[in-house]
Amino acid sequence: MNQKHEVPRIESLSVKNYRALRDLHLKELTPLTVFLGPNGSGKSTIFDVFAFLSECFTEGLRRAWDRRNRFRELRSRNADGPIEFELKYRERPDSPLITYHLAVDENQRGPYVAEEWLAWRRGKQVGQPFRFLDFRSGVGRVISGDEPEAEDERIEERLSAPDVLAVNTLGQLAKHPRVNALRQFITGWYLSYLSADNTRGVPEAGPQERLSQKGDNLPNVIQYLREQHPYRLEHILDTLRRRVPRLERVEAETTIDGRLVLQIKDAPFDQPIMAKFASDGTLKMLAYLSVLYDPDPPQLIGIEEPENQLHPRLLHGLAEECRHTSANTQLMVTTHSPFFVNGLRPEELWVLYRDEDGYTQARRAAGMENINAFVGEGAQLGDLWMEGQFEVGDPLTNAGGPRTRRSQRVPR
């Protein structure tokens, strides 16, 4: 079912002055990356970084800015200077590492792009990567072509306004394929805000290729898969049947007035029931699977706290499905469920905590003392977290700062 595709991968993320993320650096990100931490540790803020960047590209900086109440709520407390984001990513596994840097500030007229640039190192080039796009306050230079070189001509450009993103504007032009690739990557991110209640709706009939962020078009997606990708739908339902005992069939039926009703049939009964009477867990698992096994998956999927409304016993399996899917896309997941974390590997898990100044920091589980040894002996990460074996992120302490004493378990 899953063949390895050459999709863009974010390898590192740096954030400065964004709410609790005063100065956060995440390196060597894996195709499946999960952020764990107690309440208040910064999980939702990391998720919102991806949401903010996505909205800047799809709706515009000003709307994304205003939606979050501007600098009053966005800039880290006691911090000065712009909010900064930096992604390092590769378009393919064998392609050069590209750095995208975005700095946003505010003046009397509102938000503006203080700095935006793209840089890479080509071939056998030595020294620092060179910038093939470099803009400040709506004015800058860009190198066109498929493979920009440091000595190539730089074209002067002026954008329509200082709050316009250069990558979003110039990326629409065929002469800037590298800029266009980043624009397509970010505008194609899928960030999930699913709830079981939203999947119970009765939308107008008509196939739709991708699940909405809230999941309210699930019947339309099932209809699309049934008509265009029946084998993929059968794979999704087979997976769902393994996770949800005695489930037999899922159908999207059209009513007389032209609306779609999702119906679910359990094995012991002759007649299916409408989705509004089905369990939250069944509907939400079906919705997640329809995203994870999309025939044309988004290049990045973000899932916030998948444990909400799912039975704990389904979460280990969902983690496995996420890893399986990560061959075709990159997944960023936030959670505070030990059951979901039990399905992870140490290198996939980042543990968040607040430092003494109240800002979010992160540690990879694989780099913590004894964690790899414990897992090698059969221990599960979620259990180790609940036992207080992690050096940070203790669920029983306020925001999970570094612990002051060791617990008693030791690896053999």
Image (spheres, rainbow, N blue to C red):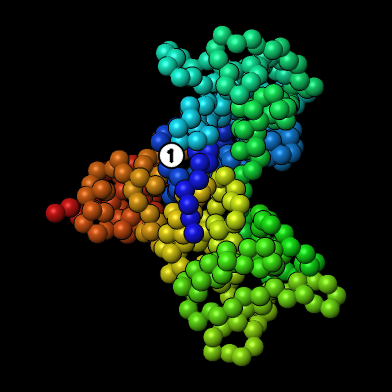
Residue 6 visible, this orientation: yes
* Frontmost residue, 210 versus 35: 210
> Which SS class for mark 1?
loop
**Residue at x 55%, y 66% (from the top left corner):** 236
Residue 284 percent location from the top left of the image: 58, 66
* Residue type pointed to by label 1: Leu
Locate the C terminus by quadrant: bottom left
Q: Is residue 213 above or below residue 368?
A: below
* Residue at the left extreme of this rendering: 412
Whether residue 280 sits left or right of residue 37 in the image: it is: right
Q: Is residue 282 above or below residue 365?
A: below
- For the point 57% across and 66% down, which residue is it? 231
Specify whether residue 326 is in view.
no
Q: Position of residue 313 (x, y in %)?
A: 43, 69
Which quarter of the figure has residue 172?
top right
Name the residue nearer the viewer: 152 or 45. 152
Q: Which residue carries the number 1 mark?
A: 29
Q: Nearer the viewer, residue 299 or 26?
A: 299
Q: Residue at x 46, y 68 (%)?
A: 314
User: Could you tell me residue 148's position as x and y percent?
Assistant: 58, 18
The total of numbered circles placed on residues is: 1
Using the rendered view, name the quadrant where residue 169 is placed.
Answer: top right
- Taking the image as shown, residue 36 lies to the left or right of residue 251, namely left
> Can you tell which quarter of the image residue 382 is in?
bottom left
Q: Nearer the viewer, residue 316 or 368?
A: 316
Task: Kindly identify the residue that appears in the image at 77 percent across and 75 percent down.
Answer: 254
* Location of residue 85 in the rendering, given as x and y in whole percent from the top left corner: 56, 29
